[in-house]
């Protein structure tokens, strides 16, 4: 039988391509570096994978697509639509983690970013009830 507790099994899950940049690491401001990322929500953790385009070509390029770049614990995180001064891009979400890191998440297609907004916000809410 699964070692997972029942409510954990109910955590929402989703995967897809998003644009992201980390802007604050542990309270320290970072230079923006937007890149595309295979993004996976699983078990209350959001994982941004390395941009395959930034990987060297060759036999390792396929496996580099599944190398995690940032792993974000959603417990205690907050998610809002970013204000205009945060980015000139459209459809930007701002995610702040409990440990003082911040990410911007963006996708041009409204329906895609709206789905992610809902599912991440729901996951954060669900974790608050645990
Ligand atoms: O908030 P900023 O500093 O205007 O963000 C832009 C810069 O990070 C820029 O790179 P440079 O570090 O070479 O200036 C990026 O190319 C832009 O995409 C950033 O702004 P947006 O508005 O796209 O988030």
Image (cartoon, grey):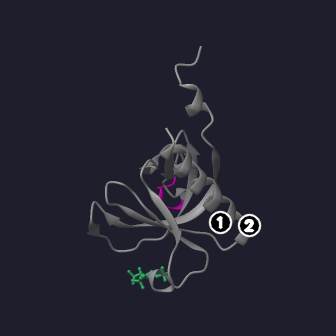
Vertically, is 4 above or below 26?
above
Image location (x, y in percent) of residue 5: 54, 25
Q: Residues within 10 Å of mark 1 (few under 14, many from 20)?
A: some
Residue 69 visible in this rendered orientation of the protein: yes
| Mark 1–mark 2 distance (CA, rounded to whole Å) | 6 Å
Please tell me which residue lies in front, 19 or 41: 41
The residue drawn where x is 49% and y is 81% is 87
Q: Quadrant of residue 21?
A: bottom left
State the residue position of label 2.
111
Residue 62 visible in this rendered orientation of the protein: no
Image location (x, y in percent) of residue 41: 57, 47
The residue drawn where x is 60% and y is 39% is 11
- Give the magenta range: 53-57
Magenta segment, prevailing SS (helix, strand or loop): loop
State the residue position of label 1.
113
Is residue 79 rendered to the left or right of residue 24?
right
């Amino acid at each position: 039988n699964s070692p997972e507790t029942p409510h954990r099994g109910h955590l929402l899950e989703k995967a897809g391509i998003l644009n992201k940049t980390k802007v604050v690491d542990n309270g320290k401001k970072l230079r923006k570096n937007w890149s595309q990322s295979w993004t996976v929500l699983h078990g209350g953790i959001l994982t941004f994978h390395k941009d395959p385009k930034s990987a060297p070509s060759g036999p390792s390029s396929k496996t580099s697509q599944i190398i995690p770049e940032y792993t974000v614990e959603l417990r205690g995180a907050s998610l809002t639509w970013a204000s205009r001064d945060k980015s000139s891009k459209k459809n930007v979400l701002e995610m702040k983690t409990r440990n003082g890191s911040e990410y911007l998440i963006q996708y041009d297609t409204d329906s895609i970013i709206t789905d992610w907004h809902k599912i991440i916000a729901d996951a954060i809410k669900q974790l608050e009830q645990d």
